Amino acid sequence: MRRPLIISDCDEVLLHMVVPFRAWLEEIHDIHFDFSLGFEDALRHKASGDPVTRAQIWPLLSAFFETEMARQSPIAGAVEAMNRLAERADIVILTNIGDTLALARTTQLSDCGLAFPVVGNHGGKGPAVARLIAAADPLVTIFVDDLQSNHVSVAASTPGVWRLHMVGEPEMAGHYPPAPEAHARLDDWARAERWIAARIEDAERSVARFGYSRP
């Protein structure tokens, strides 16, 4: 039987990112990060109170990923849940960290106990998800991501994919409404694992009953 495919984001799904990023900004760059204001309005220079511009944010993010990945730690329950799910599904980590840092992310995740293939990406994830599905021909595909824009992209490119919206950072989850394009919003791995497992079991039952998977 073809295996299911789980395509998961990394930051705020598997690993904490914004909290260690905030700590680094405070320590090294004297920048305050207020989650409640939305990412691009949240960063302000502490000395002046002036906002950090969009043009300044992306180099800061790049520098964080290039030098500070060791600050990141797993979201509660992510390692255990993903390794249990790996017994019954193939797993790929699709992360908007770019090709240049994909190897570093692979090592980072492996060191955390998440030894899965990593695919670097830029922009909407729909085209990359479509390519992964074409290559794997999975029984069923489940996509997990914290950003609504990526659920929009995947829904447009591969509407048959199950989409789980997950914001695993508790300090951020309350500031982001559920993505309408996702089938479910679950912010903890205990419930997320059960939901993913149920989608896999539904697909397996469809094959056993009808000879094919029904999304």
Image: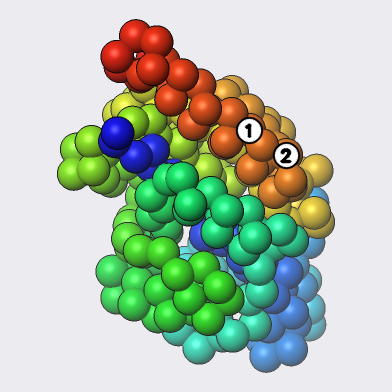
Q: Which residue is mark 1?
A: 195
If the image is split into quadrants, where does the C terminus sit?
top left
Q: Position of residue 33 (x, y in %)?
A: 74, 67
Q: Is residue 183 above or below residue 81?
A: above
Residue at position x 63%, y 53% in the image: 81
Q: Residues within 10 Å of mark 1 (few under 14, many from 20)?
A: some
Q: Residue at x 35, y 72 (%)?
A: 102
Disc 2: which residue: 191
Tell me which residue sits at (69%, 62%) in the image.
Answer: 75
Position of 167 with respect to 11 (left or right) is right
Q: CA distance from mark 2 to mark 1?
A: 6 Å
Extreme residue in the front direction = 208
Binning the other alpha carbons within 10 Å of mark 2 as few (below 14), some (14 to 19) or many (20 upward) gives few
Q: Eyeballing the image, is 16 above or below 38?
A: below
Residue 196 visible in this rendered orientation of the protein: yes
| Residues marked 2 and 1 touching at CB (< 8 Å) | yes
Q: Position of residue 184 (x, y in %)?
A: 63, 28
Image quadrant containing the N terminus? top left
Q: Quadrant of residue 130?
A: top left
Amino acid at circle 2: Arg
Q: Amino acid at mark 1?
A: Trp
Local secondary structure at mark 1: helix
Nearest the eye: 38 or 156: 156
In the image, residue 188 lies at what x, y percent?
Answer: 74, 47
Quarter of the image holding residue 42? bottom right
Badge 2 marks a residue whose secondary structure is helix
